[in-house]
Structure formats: C-alpha cells, structure tokens
Image: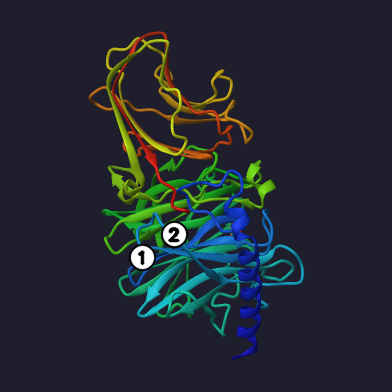
Amino acid sequence: MNSLNTKHLEALERANQEIEAKKDRIAKSRYRLQYHFMAPTGWINDPNGLVQYKGEYHLFYQFYPYASSWGPMHWGHAKSQNLVHWEHLPVALAPSESYDSGDVTGYGCFSGSAVVDGDELVLIYTGHVDGNMPQQVQNIATSTDGISFEKYTQNPVVDHFPVDGTHDFRDPKVWQHDGKWYMVVGTKNDGKGKAVLYVSDDLKDWIYKGVTAESNGTQGDMWECPDLFPINQNHALIVSPMYGTQNEKPFYVIGEMDYDQGIFTQGVNRTLDYGFDFYAPQTLVDEKGRRIMIAWMEKWLTKMPSQEFGWAGAMTIPRELFLEGDILKQMPVPELAELRSDYKKLDALEVTDKVTVYEQQESVAEISLDINVNETEASIFGIQLRCSADGKERTEILLDLENKEVVMDREQAGCGEKGMSKAPLAVKQDGTIHLHIFMDTTSIELFVNDGEQVITNRIFPDEASRQFNLFTKGGKVSVNSIETWKLDSVWK
Ligand code: FRU
C-alpha cells in the first residue's frame, strides 16, 4: 500500500467512525424526513456521481460528517435497487492529498460525476485547495466493487483551468458519446458563467475542446454543476448559476450539440424548479434508458432548522425527465408508488369559500388533484396544507387564475424560511389543471400538469398542524377528483 492510499484510508476511517458514533441519535432527531434521502449524520449538499453500476443505483453526495454546517468535503455514498430504499455505504472519498486537501479550511473533494468503464466505477471530482494556484483541479478515483475507491496516482487529470476560464473551475460531468468520453466543467470569465468541454479516450488524458456554452449575459456569472446530455433528438444543458455570491434557481436549456466543434447551441431556456430548495441537480441515464434527476433539497445561505439537531440537507425525490416539444417535464419515478398505503378518493367536489377535506391529514403523503377551471369566475383556487386548527400556520398552494401563476406561499409555514415561490400556470386544453403533491415531514414538492412546472420547498410546521383545506376567491371551482395516499418511511 502506498502512502497516498494510507492517508486516504485513515481519513475515511475517521469519517466512518464519526458516522457510527452519531447515526442512531441523528436518526431519531427532529425534522428527519421519511422517504427522502438524507445523510446518516452531519451536513450534505450536492448529489454527486449518480450512476447505475452492476444493476444497482449509486448516489454519492457532498458530505461533511463532523458538523451540521459545511466543512471540508467528503463524498458520502449510498446504493439502491429501486431509487426509493437506500442503503448507506462507507464514505467513498475524503480529503487526503495535495490536490484535494490543505492546511486551511475550505477544501476537499468537491462535486463531480461517475461513469462505468468496463468493470470499473470511475468517480471524476474537483479537488479544491484554498491558497493553491490553481485552486480547483479535476481528479479521478476508481473501484471494482462499487464500495472502496482508490484515488488515481497520477491525479490531477486536469491540473489547470483552461484559457477561457478562471480558478473557479469545478463540478465535472462526464458522459460517453460515439466511443469517446466528454466532460463539461463549470467556470466563469468576463462576468459570464461558462461550461467548458474536454474529450478523452481513457478518462485520464483530457484534451480541451473549448467553451461549449456560456451565459448570454442574463444567465449568471458562474456556472456550477453543468450537466449536458442527449434527450430525444436534442440535448439539454442544466446549470446551477451564481450571480456574484448568490446561488440562483437552476435552469435548463434545450439546444443542439455539435460534438465535432464542441459547441452547444442554446435554444429555449427555462427555470427547472421554481422552489427555493432545489439546487445542484444531477442526472443519470439508467439501464432502462430513463433520464433521472436528483437535486439537493435545500439551498446555500438559508435558515436550516435541522442544524440545531446535528444534521442538514436532503435530496429531492428522483424525477424522470421527458422532453415534450421544448418543455422538459419532470415526473416522480413510478417506483415511489411502492410507498403508498391508505388510499382515499373523493369525487366531484364543488368548492366555494372554504372546505376542509381532512381535519387530520397524513403529514407524509401524496396527493393528486384534478381541478376544472373551465367556466369559473374565481380568481384564486387555493389549497392549505399542514394547516393548524386555528388556521394561523399553513402552507398554501394558490392557482392564481387571473395572473396565470401557481404560487407556493410559505409565509406562515412554520419556523423555516418564508417566501412565495411563483411559477407560470397553463391550463390544459380540456380546461383542467392537475396537481401532484409529495409531502414529507419537512418538505413539499409540487408537480403541475405532469411536471411541466415544479416547485420544491422545505417547510417546518408544528407536528400538530395537519388540516387539509381547499378554498376559492371570487367564485366556484369544481374539483374532479382528489386522491390521497399515506407514504411509508424508507428509514425504518
Ligand atoms: C454547488 C457547489 C459546487 C461545489 C460544491 C462544494 O452547490 O458549490 O460548485 O463543487 O457545492 O461543496
């Protein structure tokens, strides 16, 4: 064993011991989610290295096991047969080498991706060392059992940012096309966020191709976590943009990829998720050919009530992506239906003013509503979730039929961040609007019209706030059906 591996193994062991020591207490702590992915201890942010390897799904993630706030980054690791039930595995990467570690704070194994190369699972990640010049470089680590990873002895595989970039140069996403490996990396220059492209035959020697896409002037000055992938006859580019020090809502662009020139031509550009708690999404293509996306269900620099209890951060539910026309739709993966029980259905309901659907709604639930707004005079159709008996605490979903907006209002939602998330609202051709809601103890994911718009937010209401109400303003709205399910915990 060389000294390089010894240092890494020691750092991993320390992290794994920390998890062992704390995980039982954390598992019982406040605000834990029931069917969303969370780390066993500490802090998580971006999903990394999403991949299916030897039939199993792997999820890695930005991880700091020692505290509930960000610290030197490790790659936490879990696997799953079905994208729903996850098994925690030993930490995959820990900061240990000159290219991913340092004596000052603010370093470690930053975000990246994973690919299967023959029998090997290969992780491609950014090493960040504050004070180094350049401070961000790209590295690889490999495994043949999908559990223990060895950092490549010749790391870094890209030891300097390209001429078009600057020292912010991170989050490699690798995929294969026509027998070659391609890698996009996020960077910035001249006040513009950019995705730069590399090509390789072996994942070790990378040739710089150039800027594959960059901000048109309105899309941020730094691009984090770019993900570029084929979908139908097109390509989609997903970016988590920064404006100065502010992280903004990830967007997607549908466009055309010219692999020879290395250029992605941007077509339409839309917000991927209109919620506050959705950042750094990453996709994988699975063995069934599905394009599946998972994001960090929290955001930088926000109030995180769970931190007080030793942990922070979770992942969204896995969502399958579909391109319809130039709209990228997101649908919860069908495997989630395994968690359903206690099915209830209400047919045809006329709502004027306010109706209480359930006094005691399950707080971990799925709700599907089909709403008919064909001939309504109403200006607003609203849903109150996690509402207290006195009505003071609540999270509202509002269909603003006048302004053609769907709003998630968490001004009165409990002790977390407040704010209103707004997305454009389109009524379907038959005059209906379909809402599909996934509630967990401290989150709501709302899918509008088969995932055309999505809003993801964390909420921190009182456990007792469980009323489920419907209301309208200015007229009557007919609801064709309401279906609800209780969802099981995956963390028993
Ligand atoms: C995005 C990000 C990445 C970086 C990682 C560090 O949330 O800032 O750009 O690699 O988090 O944890």
Residue 176, horizontal then vertical, whole percent = 36, 69
Q: Position of residue 48 (x, y in %)?
A: 50, 62
Where disc 1 sits, the SS reads: loop
Ligand 1 shows up in the quarter that is bottom right
| Location of residue 71 by image quarter | bottom right
Instruction: Tell me what residue is drawn at x 28 percent, y 43 percent.
Output: 324
Q: Is residue 328 above or below residue 146?
A: above
Q: Which residue is mark 2?
A: 86
Can the viewer see residue 384? no
| Residue 474 in sight | yes
Residue sitting at the far bottom: 1
- Locate residue 178 relative to residue 1 in the image: left or right: left
In the image, residue 450 lies at what x, y percent?
A: 31, 38
The residue identified by callout 1 is 259
Instruction: Count numbered badges in the picture.
Output: 2
User: SS for tag 2?
Assistant: strand
> What's under tag 2, amino acid-wise?
Trp
Mark 1 or mark 2, which has the lower sequence index?
2
Corner quadrant of residue 68: bottom right
Q: Quadrant of residue 287?
A: bottom left
Observer-nearest residue: 360 or 179? 360
Q: Which mark is residue 212?
A: none
